[in-house]
Image (tube, helix red, strand yellow):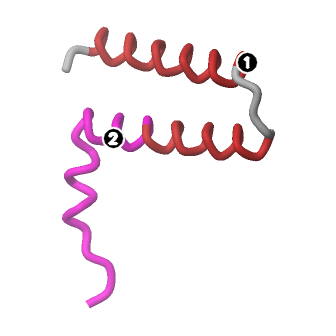
Amino acid sequence: MPLLQVVIILIVVGVLLWLINSFIPMQGTIKKILNAVVIIAVVLWLLSVFGLLDSLSNIRIGT
């Protein structure tokens, strides 16, 4: 995936999250949970785009 496309997707996700936080009335705790879920999903997506998530699945913990 080209770097420009990744940057555009990140900008779109950021703007959508800002719009949701600014214009949709929600309780503060729900906004925090929504923000956390979106940030975790974006970080996992970025790790998979850059190929780091595949290498992490090969790590074995324990026996």
Label 2 neighbourhood size at 10 Å, few (<14), some (14-19), many (20+)?
some
The amino acid type found where label 2 is placed reads: Leu
Which residue corresponds to the image point at 38% horizontal and 10% vertical from the top-left? Answer: 8
Q: Which residue extends farthest right?
A: 28
Q: Is residue 10 left or right of residue 18?
A: left
The amino acid type found where label 1 is placed reads: Ser
Q: Is residue 8 left or right of residue 1?
A: right
Q: Mark 1 and mark 2 in contact (Cβ < 8 Å)?
A: no
> Which residue position is annotated with label 2?
47
Q: Which residue occupies the foreground of this view, 60 or 38? A: 38
Query: Percent position (x, y) of residue 21?
Result: 69, 24
Query: Percent position (x, y) of residue 23?
Result: 71, 16
In the displayed structure, would residue 40 be above or below residue 49?
Answer: below
Which quarter of the image is occupied by the C terminus? bottom left
Q: Does the segment drawn in magenta span residue 47?
A: yes
Q: Which mark is residue 53?
A: none
Q: Which mark is residue 22?
A: 1
**Distance from Cα at disc 2 to Cα at disc 1:** 28 Å
Query: Percent position (x, y) of residue 14?
Result: 54, 19
